[in-house]
Image: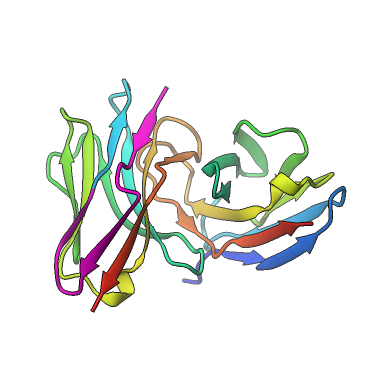
Amino acid sequence: AQKITQTQPGMFVQEKEAVTLDCTYDTSDQSYGLFWYKQPSSGEMIFLIYQGSYDEQNATEGRYSLNFQKARKSANLVISASQLGDSAMYFCAMSFDSWGKLQFGAGTQVVVTP
Amino acid sequence: KAGVTQTPRYLIKTRGQQVTLSCSPISGHRSVSWYQQTPGQGLQFLFEYFSETQRNKGNFPGRFSGRQFSNSRSEMNVSTLELGDSALYLCASSALGGGGQETQYFGPGTRLLVL
């Protein structure tokens, strides 16, 4: 069985600072995808970044980067230069060889303060 | 390209009623997945449809059902509503629904309140 753990239920970060959101997972599968989504209070899940299990380089998308450590089974999201609009719930998710199914962690609530 | 759309955005129903939610995927996407989000259980996978066929199903009772039309639009239905069905229902689309590498793009969700 696969399990995704986000140990930080919530955190405050000051505007313009960087923040790291933790995600660890447990799986014996070798092929999988790792995703991070952002969910503002409006409810929509916004795709941020993707990392494949066989990708050798860490993924980056603008201010988002994924610190992928396969041996440690961790896929932390780093947000650089936080903005007030980054305040939201952040979910780590994984997909395996299963049609259309994502498995989600419990999420981390991020509040960016001025 | 237009994103994933879901209707209605909000619904209030009473116990015992049934409800139908609709999802239109991104143009060209043929896979639609449905998720239920509650404070207690988090995000849980309901089912996935591709080319009008259900290919995958989560661990939900038979009261939860869905279908997909030839234009890839999908509906989910919940019969005999229970208080615990109150949730945010999210649908997501992807091109082929393949596991591992395909990104799913989500709609804004339908908030269902069962009284």
Number of callouts in the render? 0
Residue B90: quarter of image: bottom right
Residue at image coords 67%, 44%: B52
| Residue A50: percent from left, percent from top | 29, 49
Image color mode:
rainbow
Q: Magenta stretch containing residue A7, yes or no?
A: yes
Residue at image coords 64%, 59%: B23
Q: Quadrant of the N terminus of chain A?
A: top left
User: Looking at the picture, does residue B91 appear above or below residue B40?
Assistant: below
Q: Quadrant of the C terminus of chain A?
A: bottom left
Does the image show residue A27?
yes
Q: Is residue A84 left or right of residue A82?
A: right
User: Looking at the picture, does residue A7 appear above or below residue B70?
Assistant: above
| Residue B83: percent from left, percent from top | 75, 48
Residue A16: quarter of image: bottom left
The span shown in magenta is A1-21
User: Looking at the picture, does residue A45 appear above or below residue A98?
Assistant: below
Residue at image coords 27%, 70%: A112
Q: Identify which residue, A49 or B29, lies in the foreground.
A: A49
